[in-house]
Amino acid sequence: PRNADEQVVIDKSIEFYCLALDDEQSSQINELLASKKSVGSKEIDDLKAGNVKLELIPRGVGKIEVLALSLYHEIKVGENVNMEVRVKNAGTRRLDNIRIYTDLPLNWRSEIKPDLIASLDQGKEEIVAIDFIPSEDASVGDFEPKIRTECIADNRRVESEDKIVRIHISARANVLGITLLVIFLVGLLVGIVVFGIKLTRR
């Protein structure tokens, strides 16, 4: 099966036999299987057939996913990016010691809550809040910090894919300059109207 269930349990061994049967022995084993779900070692020994006992231990596969509603953000100079990501166990066994961290442009900072998840069972997920804080001298332009994860499953490191966040920083509007420009234009318009009225009276 794709996922563990009552019959296939992670880290619990599954024993079975491989048999070399002639026609008569094959008929006998079919009769046994028709009357019961499984055949034990005693019935197999009674067949006097060549056999080997095998054992499988399901280990499962560790897989982690990082999901976000959007990986593109637009901010003004002096603002921060606040976002949430979902860290999900998309594998078939428990993930342990999940660490979330970032790879940042020069002099940027980040705040991650939580930055460490002790464990995450199969199919479960957890919300992680990430704040990207640009440097004080960050210029207008595009920046690409990365979100990275590390974790282990069955004492093995799990490979993960980096998420690239694209942040566009634009210049903050000059409110004073715009206000002065509007006042100048209004004054110019009033002056034109007054001048026009004086001309019509002459």
Image (spheres, rainbow, N blue to C red):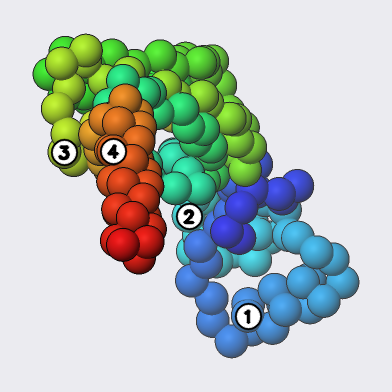
Residue at 37% from the left image edge and 61% from the top image edge: 201
SS at badge 1:
helix
| Circles 2, 4 touching at the beta carbon (< 8 Å) | no
Which residue carries the number 2 mark?
A: 52
Give coordinates of residue 24: x percent, y percent.
64, 84
Q: Dot 3, crowdedness within 10 Å: few (<14), some or many (≥20)?
A: few
Which residue carries the number 1 mark?
A: 26
Q: Amino acid at mark 4?
A: Phe
Q: Nearer the viewer, mark 1 or mark 4?
A: 4
**Residue 11 in sight here:** no
Give coordinates of residue 52: x percent, y percent.
48, 55
Query: How far apart are the alpha carbons under marks 3 and 4?
Result: 31 Å
Q: Earlier in the sequence, mark 2 or mark 4?
A: 2
**Residue 79 position by quadrant:** top left
Left or right relative to 33: residue 26 = left
Identify the disc placed on residue 107. Answer: none
Query: How far apart are the alpha carbons under marks 2 and 1?
Result: 16 Å
Q: Earlier in the sequence, mark 3 or mark 1?
A: 1
Q: Residue furthest right?
A: 35
Q: Nearer the viewer, residue 184 or 1?
A: 184
Query: How far apart are the alpha carbons under marks 3 and 2?
Result: 67 Å
Left or right relative to 162: residue 29 = right
Query: How far apart are the alpha carbons under marks 2 and 4?
Result: 96 Å
SS at badge 4:
helix
Q: Amino acid at mark 3?
A: Gly
Q: Earlier in the sequence, mark 3 or mark 2?
A: 2
